[in-house]
Image (cartoon, rainbow, N blue to C red):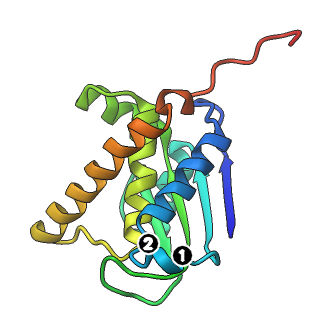
Amino acid sequence: MSLTVRSRQKTHRVDAWLLRRLAKWTLDITEPDAEHRPRGHELSVFIVGPVEMARVNFSSLQHEGPTDVITFDYCEPGHAPKPGPIFGDLFICPIVAEEFAAKFNTNWPEEVARYLIHGILHLRGFDDCDAARRKRMKREENRLLDEAKKRFPLSRLAKGPKTKGR
């Protein structure tokens, strides 16, 4: 498995190791063929600022401005839950996460976890292009986020400031 987590922004320090653990867990738990879990995943997660996110959003979707998460799936299309290894990129913007966190009375690390789960669900074939599929995907996203909250200290996705001399 190739799993890369990179932060390309400086405003919100993210614990890449914890985000990797969450991504691995999500990939495993969403695999429909649990007996034959594939190990050939190739996933890159990029934590980006609003300028880069707006650029990716416009160049790939022709939408203006930054958004929360963008998923690029490089595998053959399939219906949820799509089995097998995934190959894709996720772009997540913590500034947008912070805006939604204030709106939904949560915190930005939890929103980032939600976006990671949401992106992996897209890679597993879930879609939110119409009301019925969006409802199914949102239900699965909420279920996985609730389970992730029990297993991981999501608040620790936000790393504190570096202290000098340590």
Give the image location of residue 137, x and y in percent.
24, 63
SS at badge 1 = loop
Question: Which residue does the image show at 38% across and 81% down from the upper left?
Answer: 82
Q: Quadrant of the C terminus?
A: top right
Going by the numbered disc 2, the residue's amino acid type is: Glu
Please determine whether, in this image, residue 150 is positioned above or below residue 57: above
| Residue closest to the eye, 154 or 165 | 154
- Evaluate whether residue 68 shows in this view: no
Residue linked to disc 2: 31
The label shown at residue 164 is none
Residue 131 shown left or right of residue 40 in the figure: left
Give the image location of residue 73, x and y in percent.
49, 76
Q: Quadrant of the N terminus?
A: bottom right
> Which residue ends up furthest to the right in the rendered image?
165
Question: Which residue does the image show at 77% across and 12% down from the upper left?
Answer: 163
Question: Which residue does the image show at 26% across and 25% down from the upper left?
Answer: 105
Residue 119 shown left or right of residue 55 in the figure: left
Question: Which residue does the image show at 67% across and 46% down from the upper left?
Answer: 8
Please determine whether, in this image, residue 8 is positioned above or below residue 165: below
For the residues labelled 2 and 1, the Cα–Cα distance comes to: 7 Å
Residue linked to disc 1: 37
Going by the numbered disc 1, the residue's amino acid type is: Arg
Contact flag, marks 2 and 1 (Cβ < 8 Å): yes
